[in-house]
Every structure is written in C-alpha cells, then in structure tokens.
Image: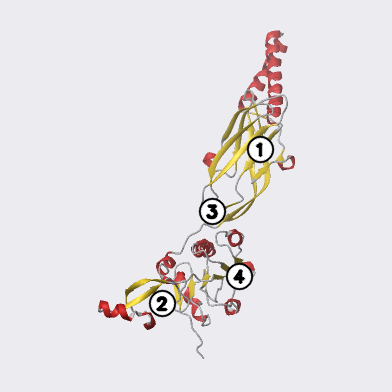
Amino acid sequence: MATHFTRRGREKRGPRLTNRGIVLVALSLLALFAGGVLQEKVLAQLGFFGVILTLLSMLLCWVNVRGIDIVRLAPTATHAMADFRIELVVTNRKPWMDSFALEMEDSLLPYANRGLLANWIRAGGHCRMAFVTRLVKRGVLKHASITITSLFPFGLCQISQRRRVATEITVYPKAVTPRRLEHHYESDYLEGVTEGLVTRDVSGDLHGMREFQPGDPIKSIHWPATARAQQVIVREFDQPMPERYSIVFHSYCPQQSLIWPDAFETSLELLAGLLYFCARKQVPIDFTASFNDWQTVRVQDPRNLSVPLGILARAVHRPEKTLKRVVRTIEQMPGHHALFVFSETPVKLWSSKLPALPRPVTCLDNNDVQIRRPIFNLA
C-alpha cells in the first residue's frame, strides 16, 4: 500500500537560527555597530555581509524543503513483533532547484534507525530507501508521520516540518500456539475423530494392518491375518478430515474474580495461534467471539485468515458476568465437529458449567487445556 503526504498534513514551521547562526548574527551586528562608531567601512561591510548571508541562508533553507513529496510503501496488514519491509520514495518536484542534505525521521522505524539522509535529489528526480521494521502492539495504525529537517546550505539555520499521513496498517496479534494444545492434539483428535477420544474411526480408506491396541473396535479385527500371525491383527484406516472447526471466545468474569487486562492480550495471541493451528488442517473454520458481538465469521478458505485476524486486531475487552450467551451459542451449533471454547478466565471456573454436547469440546485458557468427550443421545 502506498501512502503519501498532502499539504493539509504539514505542520508549517519557518526556518530558525542554529547556534552557529546566532553567533554569526551577533558578530555581524557587533561589527555593524563598531564600524559605525569607529567609522571603519571594512568592519561595517563585514557586518552587513554577515546579515545578508544569514538572510540568504534562511531563504535557501526554506526553498530546499519546498516541493518535496514522500511516498511510503508498506503492507496493509502485519503481525505484532513480526518484521516487515517499508520503502520511502522521496521526490523533488521543483523544476529548477536541486535539494540537498534532507534528514528524515519516520515514526514507523525504530528509534535508532529513524535518522535517514537524502544527500542530493535532482530537480524532478527522486530517491528510494528501503528498511525493515516491526510494530509492537496490535491494533489499527491510522496515522504515521515523517519529520523532514534541513540545515542547508551553511548550517546557519534549520527548518523542520512534521508531515502527518492518514494511513492504515492492521496489526494482528502475535500468533502463539498454546503449548498444551500441541501436546494433547498431535494424535488423532484433530485428524477427524468426532465420536469420542477412546474409540477409533474406521470409516476411512484402508491404510494397512497392525497389532491390536486398546480402544480398537472389534469389527476392525482381520481374522485371517490374526490366525496366520498368532496375534490379534486389525485393519488400520485413514481417518477422514473433519467437516470444520468451531472456535468460541468469551470473557466470562465471575464475581469476586480478578482478570488482569494483560490476560486478555495474551488470550488474543493464543487465539491467533489457534486459528493458524486449525487452518493447517485445511478445513473451514467458524469463529465466534464476545468482543465481536457474538457474530459468527465463517472462514471457508483456511488459507485466508485476514477477516478473523482483523477482528482480533480491533478487539476490545468486554467482560461478562454470566455464561448464558456462551451456552446458547454452543447449543445452537449444528453438526458434530470439534469445538474450541477459549477464554482468558481460568478453565476451572467455567468448563463444568457448559452443557454436555454430542461433539468433542476443548476448553482452553492461557495456561490450561481440558478435553470433554462427546455425549451421544442413544434414545
């Protein structure tokens, strides 16, 4: 995305004398006074020349920054603490005068790297500068400024203009996959098991045969192979991919409980990691959150998470005193696919209050994971 400065975004400041300029003006005035008193023409002429040189320097310094246009090329979205590349294109639109020694400070760059220098830009020409930077906090960056400073030509005066640009960079939370989640779900759970954690699915294509393991259904036993091997051999099937994943986030805050604001930010980072964790399975995702007014976002293409991540970037903490909305939301979900319920509130304070569901449910907080087996109504 390209962003550029307009005249409305400029803070107009005229040239001001530097310490060197103040000394020259003081000496020039002193020379003029002494030359008049002592009737010394040479001394008076030197004083007059110093004043003229100062005024000319102020004029050239002002003209040096005139007609300078800056275009910033930056991505429209990035993750917090992730490096991204920006490029500055500085153009001198004056038709008759070159610009020299332009110092620039871009607020998007780290403090140590903000001092940029364009030594010489021809009239009608431009220069390009590329840098790598990062943004620390999530959110939407709508304004970023660049300060242009010039000491040209003799360092006697300085002009500084701060130009503000209306830009928009969406900063997603840093994606952190919950470690406990990876520990629990490296096995069959995220590979399509939807009928409990103690039974194995035999509805996929035949993959091969292996020894019997606890939890294998009796119907998967291959009796001829068992007779030949003198041990129980079962058929191994490729498990089908799940139809989709559902993620529900809530900020339930029970009475007499204290939830720190930092916990919410940590939850958003883990929630972003959970989105990527599910997207790696290449199945659609449904995302519902309390900070999104309980609206469900359907991600049909898991390779594109820009919509739910953008919601995380703009999220505002909204604590709730009851779990009624959470319960109603998960009870109304069709299907039997896997459900993740996430909150910055510890799992032990709310997981037992959720209803029994005919789907595998994973309850998560910032530090813990609890798995709830699906409950089927056999009536």
Which residue type carries mark 1? Ile
- Image coordinates of residue 13 in percent, x first then y, are 71, 35
The count of marks equals 4
Could you tell me which secondary element the residue under label 3 belongs to?
A: loop
For the residues labelled 2 and 4, the Cα–Cα distance comes to: 34 Å
Residue 70: which disc? Answer: 1
| Residue located beneath label 4 in the image | 290
| Residue located beneath label 2 in the image | 200
For the residues labelled 3 and 4, the Cα–Cα distance comes to: 22 Å
**Label 3–label 4 contact, CB within 8 A:** no
Question: Residue at the spot x=56%, y=36% of the render?
Answer: 115
For the residues labelled 4 and 1, the Cα–Cα distance comes to: 41 Å
**Label 2–label 4 contact, CB within 8 A:** no
Say which label, 2 or 4, has the lower sequence index: 2
Question: Residue at the spot x=55%, y=50% of the render?
Answer: 135
Does residue 299 lie above or below 161 as drawn? below
Which residue type carries mark 2? Arg
Q: Determine crowd level at label 2: few under 14, some 14-19, many 20+ residues with C-alpha closer than 10 A.
A: many
- Image coordinates of residue 300 in percent, x first then y, are 59, 65
Does residue 150 lie above or below 374 as drawn? above
Which residue type carries mark 4? Ser
**Label 2–label 1 contact, CB within 8 A:** no
Say which label, 4 or 1, has the lower sequence index: 1
- Outermost residue on the left side: it is 230
For the residues labelled 2 and 1, the Cα–Cα distance comes to: 62 Å
Which residue type carries mark 3? Ala
Q: Determine crowd level at label 1: few under 14, some 14-19, many 20+ residues with C-alpha closer than 10 A.
A: many
Say which label, 3 or 2, has the lower sequence index: 3
Say which label, 2 or 1, has the lower sequence index: 1
Could you tell me which secondary element the residue under label 1 belongs to?
A: strand
Residue 80: which disc? Answer: 3
